[in-house]
Amino acid sequence: MSEAVRMALYPTGDGHRIGVLTLDSPASLNALNLPMIQRLQEVLTAWERDPAVVCVLLQGAGEKAFCAGGDIRSFYYQKEASEHEQFVFARDFFEQEYRLDHHIHRYAKPLICVADGICMGGGIGLFAGADFRIVTEKSLFAMPEVTIGLYPDVGASWFLSRMPGRLGLWLGLTGARFNGADAIGLGLADHAMASSERAELLPRLAALDWSGNEPREQLDRLLRGLQTEVIADFPAPILLPHQVRIDGLMAGRTLQGVLDRLFEAGFDDTEERLAQARETCLSGSPISRAILWRQYWQARRQSLAEVFADELALSVNCVLRGDFVEGVRALLIDKDKSPRWLAPQPGTDWLDEYYVWPQGINPLQAGAR
């Protein structure tokens, strides 16, 4: 329900307002459903047009998560519907989610997002485009779509392909987890603060001078100050120290070459996380791996809007003809963790069909604006 998104307007000292949006479904780790997506879009659009609102703060309720992703169980419960009904459901969900994510990337006013706790999948879609992206010592990120027969979407094709070395490729293929310090080093986050200081953030924002011409400069100084206070006790990165090793494992320009190298790799006691990520990759959906591989290389030459348009067609096709519904069943419904993945057809032409928008609609017209 849209009530799972709380909105409030907080007065500043100089007579303006700060808009506060809170994902408020702690029991589901603030997972996004379509009414929540629609409510976020509606309010962000209204505040963008309101001259009294000078800044937006986006956060999650509870102590465990900002947003654990999309409410993907709903796709499983559509499996008995007609193909047309499944198509309409998937199209509406993904199109509106991606429009929201793209809107955040282009938002005209300062938009601050605090990823305190779990931030995965669709949560990263909200977080990645914010003007000021804040992590805490509790932040935990992942793009684990390979385990559910999807692929890293919500614009991930765009930002994973722009991360240092082959780290983005690793994260997409393996669903590996990373923390706040990693997110800053990967260019996915901008600032750090203590989780315990979250309640004080809004009053500090309200105390800034919003009448000037450089609100982002003031915001940056404030957030850099909070980071200085916490940095000595901030957890060390868990992914970045392995970049050389990961770049070596991900070397080459064929997916099969990378998978063969991963399968044959040996890991020592300091590389337990890498070994676990390898197993996740090798047990994941072959279709998901193939889509991620193609998107990683292709997205480097695309605009963000083009990436979202491709992802819209891809995601709908993953529902209609791919592994997504089966992956949701195995991981979240029956929880047997034994998905029956489809085998990709011989050759590479089969993947082209996932880029063809069902019912002949041009994805560039139906996709993100």
Image (cartoon, rainbow, N blue to C red):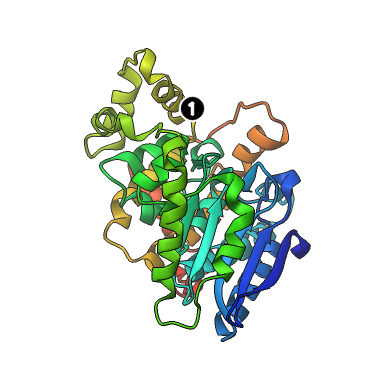
Q: Is residue 360 visible?
A: no
Check the image and report above or below for 5 versus 71: below
Instruction: Tell me which corner region of the image, top left, top right, bottom left or bottom right, holds residue 181.
Output: top left
Mark 1 crowd level (few <14, some 14–19, many ≥20, 10 Å Cα) = some
Residue 113 higher or lower than 149, as above or below:
below
User: Vertical placement of 359 versus 179: above or below?
Assistant: below
Percent position of residue 97, x then y: 57, 62
Identify the residue shown where x is 37% and y is 54%. Answer: 159
In this picture, residue 93 sits left or right of residue 153: right
- Where residue 41 sits: x, y (%)? 61, 71
Q: Residue at x 62, y 39 (%)?
A: 326
Q: From where the camera sits, is residue 220 visible? A: yes
Residue at left offset 52%, top offset 45%? 136
Front in this rendered view, residue 212 or 35 = 212
Q: Residue at 50% across / 71% down in the picture?
A: 103
- Quarter of image, res 302: bottom left
Residue 6: x, y in percent?
72, 64
Q: What SS does tag 1 mark?
A: helix
Residue 95 in the image, given as x and y percentages of width and height: 56, 66
Q: Which residue is mark 1?
A: 283
Query: Which quarter of the rendered picture does the N terminus lie within?
Result: bottom right
Number of callouts: 1
Classify residue 70 as left or right of residue 162.
right
Nearer to the camera, 255 or 72: 72
Front one among 333 and 81:
333
Mark 1: which amino acid? Ser
